[in-house]
């Protein structure tokens, strides 16, 4: 027994305006039903009518050729009291441009699955494309979403209403229909309350940080045997590139994977041009672990002090720092009683333990780059309780009244000419903006007025003579006047 069927919307222009649709049942010959009753479309005998299951004020009316889920009070009477719920949808952000086939491609087990719909998250929940961040209602919040690029969502103690939150479909940018992408130019209204009150104070902030550079070289070493070692081998890689920060001095470490087959990232130094897969090998004077770690330590210290010039004039001017030294992966995987002793004895300057970063000739470790600046810092106001904010942001913001106080020199908006349903771009640009006025930045106006007061208070010359233009207070006022329009008026915030 089925309680829910699938249908396809074929007409959504309900003459009564109560959200009804005409549908075509999926998988059923409509002629079988049509021949059983005489009817006209939208009349009381129309067997293909469905009313909204949800209350009308929150119902989504489907587009033509979109899928609907049909619910029936009596499953034996297919044409009576049929209600619908729009959906399903397979896009999280573009609900308008979907058709029946697309809507069911990822929702039918064992059915025909249409390939091509992109997944916006991986299985851990992380967005597959960074441009998607901020475009979706967070899982812990509640939201209401429009067909495309508009939403309202409720956070803890907060509400956001966003218009144009997504990049426009006709923007020319790639993948806007596959991955929702946040628009920088959205119009947004924010309401938010915080548990504590903060105010801005100016104070010195220490932004010092450890210096970071890209490695120039990576040096790996190994020995042929831990019982009777005879040979020490070195593999010296020059860092050429890399698309990420994998070779940064604050990222690369003993366990970092080395992409030795990527010739665009690394180049193995081969001093004898014999292409043996090893840069340098040294026969040990004695076949002991002590002789092995002393030999490796000495060569690493020579490389630190003289660079690759120890291998000949060919590398005379090649700066080696910063470099990272470590045992090869093969050596690290060896299990032997002598391995720990051997690795712990490998030391370059004060860096011990067999591996580490040598940052420069002057500093083995990265130096601290000291930096202090005066900046705004939010500090709590004690015993002030909660604090609330509201913010309205857009390219142009208009505060308009339908009954403003209009003087003889004030232009008026003709509200009767504006679109009744939704203000158009032409309404804003042609009918509202020319008849509104820029808001004044109060602090800047105050500075100009105070400069005038100071000038008048300091003026001791004959009132019939012009002001002395070398007066510092006159110079201060002149500077303020020269940029007064841009300093004083915000032409994007307008009132009528």
Image (cartoon, rainbow, N blue to C red):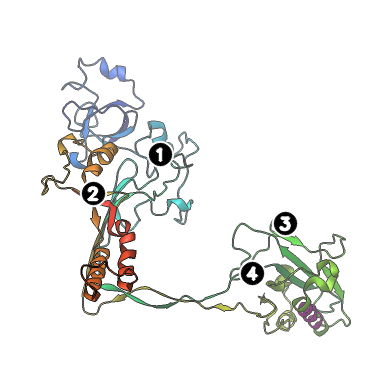
Magenta residue check for 297: yes
> Who comes first in sequence, dot 2 or dot 4?
4
- In the picture of the structure, the residue carrying the numbered disc 2 is 398
> Who comes first in sequence, dot 2 or dot 3?
3
- In the picture of the structure, the residue carrying the numbered disc 4 is 255
Contact, mark 2 vs mark 4 (Cβ under 8 Å): no
Q: Looking at the image, is 493 positioned above or below residue 345? A: above
Magenta residue check for 124: no
- In the picture of the structure, the residue carrying the numbered disc 3 is 261
- Residue sitting at x 24%, y 76%: 458
- In the picture of the structure, the residue carrying the numbered disc 1 is 169
Q: CA distance from mark 1 to mark 2?
A: 26 Å
Horizontal placement of 431 versus 131: left or right?
A: left
Q: Nearer the viewer, residue 110 or 49?
A: 49
> Who comes first in sequence, dot 1 or dot 2?
1
Q: Quadrant of residue 485?
A: bottom left
Q: Element type at marker 2? A: strand
Q: Element type at marker 3? A: loop
Q: Element type at marker 1? A: helix
The magenta segment: 293-302
Nearer to us of marks 2 and 3 is 2
Q: CA distance from mark 1 to mark 3?
A: 41 Å
Q: Looking at the image, is 481 positioned above or below residue 349? A: above
Report crowding for label 4: few under 14, some 14 to 19, many 20 or more residues within 10 A (C-alpha).
few
Nearer to us of marks 2 and 4 is 2
> Who comes first in sequence, dot 3 or dot 4?
4
């Amino acid at each position: 027994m089925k309680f829910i069927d699938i249908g396809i919307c074929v007409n959504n222009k309900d003459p009564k305006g109560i959200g009804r649709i005409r549908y075509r049942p999926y998988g059923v010959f409509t002629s079988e039903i049509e021949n059983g009753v005489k009817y006209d479309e939208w009349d009381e005998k129309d067997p293909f009518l469905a009313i909204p299951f949800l209350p009308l004020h929150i119902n989504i009316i489907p587009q033509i050729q979109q899928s609907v889920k049909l619910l029936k009070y009596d499953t034996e009477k297919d044409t009576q009291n049929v209600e619908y719920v729009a959906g399903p949808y397979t896009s999280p952000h573009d609900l308008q441009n979907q058709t029946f086939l697309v809507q069911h491609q990822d929702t039918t087990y064992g059915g025909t699955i249409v390939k091509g719909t992109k997944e916006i998250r991986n299985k851990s929940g992380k967005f597959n494309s960074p441009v998607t961040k901020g475009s979706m209602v967070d899982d812990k919040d509640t939201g209401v979403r429009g067909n495309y690029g508009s939403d309202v969502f409720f956070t803890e103690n907060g509400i956001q209403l966003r218009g144009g939150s997504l990049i426009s479909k006709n923007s020319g940018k790639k993948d806007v229909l596959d991955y929702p992408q946040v628009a920088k130019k959205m119009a947004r209204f924010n309401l938010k309350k915080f548990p504590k009150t903060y105010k801005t104070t100016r104070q010195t902030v220490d932004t010092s940080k450890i210096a970071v550079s890209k490695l120039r070289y990576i040096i790996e070493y190994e020995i042929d045997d831990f019982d009777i070692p005879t040979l020490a081998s070195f593999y010296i890689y020059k860092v050429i590139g890399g698309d990420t920060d994998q070779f940064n001095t604050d990222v690369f470490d003993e366990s970092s994977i080395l992409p030795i087959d990527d010739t665009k990232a690394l180049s193995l130094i081969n001093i004898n041009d014999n292409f043996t897969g090893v840069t340098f090998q040294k026969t040990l004077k004695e076949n002991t672990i002590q002789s092995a770690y002393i030999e490796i330590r000495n060569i690493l210290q020579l490389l630190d002090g003289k660079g690759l010039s120890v291998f000949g004039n060919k590398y005379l001017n090649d700066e080696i720092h910063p470099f990272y030294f470590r045992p090869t992966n093969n050596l690290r995987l060896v299990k032997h009683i002598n391995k720990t002793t051997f690795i712990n004895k490998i030391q370059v300057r004060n860096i011990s333990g067999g591996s580490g970063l040598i940052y420069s000739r002057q500093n083995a470790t990265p130096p601290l780059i000291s930096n202090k600046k005066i900046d705004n810092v939010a500090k709590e106001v004690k015993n002030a309780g909660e604090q609330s904010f509201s913010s309205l942001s857009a390219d142009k913001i208009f505060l308009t009244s339908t009954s403003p106080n209009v003087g003889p020199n004030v232009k008026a908006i003709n509200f009767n000419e504006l679109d009744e349903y939704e203000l158009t771009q032409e309404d804003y640009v042609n009918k509202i903006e020319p008849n509104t006025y820029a808001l004044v930045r109060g602090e800047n106006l105050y500075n100009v007025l105070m400069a005038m007061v100071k000038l008048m208070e300091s003026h001791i010359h004959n009132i019939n003579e012009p002001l002395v233009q070398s007066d510092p207070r006159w110079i201060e006022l002149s500077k303020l006047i020269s940029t007064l329009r841009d300093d004083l008026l915000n032409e994007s915030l307008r009132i009528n």
